[in-house]
Image (cartoon, grey):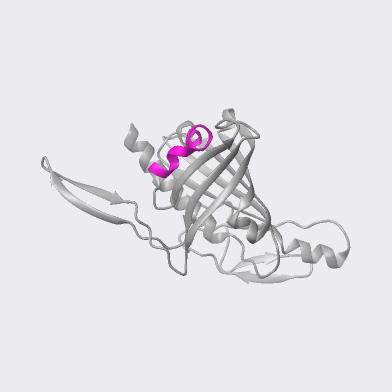
């Protein structure tokens, strides 16, 4: 189950000093808090910059522990593809060490519509499902890459921050920073994954990365299922 950061009503309003416009969230099952950060400077530059720089965040409730989920991105991101093969096809270490500040990792992922070939078989009295990692790229999605630098790692907070330095996102954004923090649930088992995007679009034609946030939410659920299966 996903949680909102604050209570929002539809349609979602983005307000700046001299601009107000409406956005329809990509999913009515959960809402996302979209903040536009105002920059300093002249009034005209301030208004223009405020519509290009933004924050997008959401929370996802999972059953796995906070430490285990954090470790998937800090300690073994090269295993993420095993947990969510339809979305992430691989993660390579290009420089440094896994989970260390300053290290460079390279992701291969599929953002958009995809199809997994699956089949079921009956063995020893139980049905089992196998997934074949065959992806079908269409006009609404494609295989993409992202080269990221680890900017911060705080194990005691189960927090890791990546900045995108090369790849497909840089075609649409001047900067893109992703922070993942996982906290234990209060008064119960499981955890809450907090995804936080901070970015600057190259121009007004570029959409806010709502679909990428949905991607992160769905990926979190699949990683959660994978972690539970390992117990």
Q: What is the span of residues highlighted in magenta in the rendered image?
A: 70-82
Viewer-nearest residue: 142 or 58: 142
Which residue is painted at 23% across and 49% down in the image?
129
Residue found at the far top of this picture: 156
At x 16% / y 49%, what residue is drawn? 121
Of all residues shown, which one is farthest toward the left? 125
Place residue 208 in its image quadrant: bottom right
Residue at figure coordinates x 39%, y 53% from the top left: 86
Q: Position of residue 22 (x, y in %)?
A: 63, 71
Report whether residue 75 is seen: yes
| 60 horizontally vs 17: left or right | left
Residue 15 relative to residue 193: left or right: right
Quarter of the image for the C terminus: give it. top left
- Comparing 18 with 148, the one in front is 148
Q: Residue 15, located in which quarter of the rendered image?
A: bottom right
Say which residue appears at 55% left-offset and 33% top-offset: 158
| Magenta segment main secondary structure | helix
Asked if residue 107 is among those painted magenta in the image, a careful observer would answer no
Residue 39: image location, x then y, percent: 80, 56
Q: Farthest front residue?
A: 94
Residue 2 locus on image (x, y percent): 47, 51
> Whole-percent x and y of residue 103?
62, 35
């Amino acid at each position: 189950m996903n949680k909102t950061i604050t209570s929002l009503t539809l349609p979602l309003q983005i307000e700046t000093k001299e601009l107000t416009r409406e956005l329809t969230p990509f999913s009515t099952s959960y809402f996302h808090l979209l903040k536009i950060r105002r920059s300093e400077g002249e009034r005209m530059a301030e208004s223009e910059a405020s519509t290009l720089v933004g924050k997008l965040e959401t929370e996802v409730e999972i059953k796995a522990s906070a430490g285990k989920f954090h470790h998937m991105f800090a300690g073994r991101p090269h295993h993420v593809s095993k947990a969510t093969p339809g979305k992430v096809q691989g993660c390579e270490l290009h420089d440094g060490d896994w989970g260390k500040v300053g290290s460079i990792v390279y992701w291969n992922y599929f953002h958009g519509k995809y199809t997994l070939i699956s089949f079921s078989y009956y063995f020893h009295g139980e049905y089992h499902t196998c997934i074949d990692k065959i992806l079908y790229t269409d006009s609404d999605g494609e295989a993409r890459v992202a080269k990221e630098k680890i900017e911060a790692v705080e194990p005691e907070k189960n927090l890791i921050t990546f900045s995108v330095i090369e790849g497909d996102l840089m075609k649409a954004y001047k900067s893109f920073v992703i922070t993942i923090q996982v906290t234990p649930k209060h008064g119960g088992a499981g955890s809450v994954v907090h995804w936080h995007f901070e970015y600057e679009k190259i121009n007004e034609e570029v959409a806010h990365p709502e679909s990428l946030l949905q991607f992160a939410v769905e990926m979190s659920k699949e990683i959660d299922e994978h972690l539970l299966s390992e117990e």
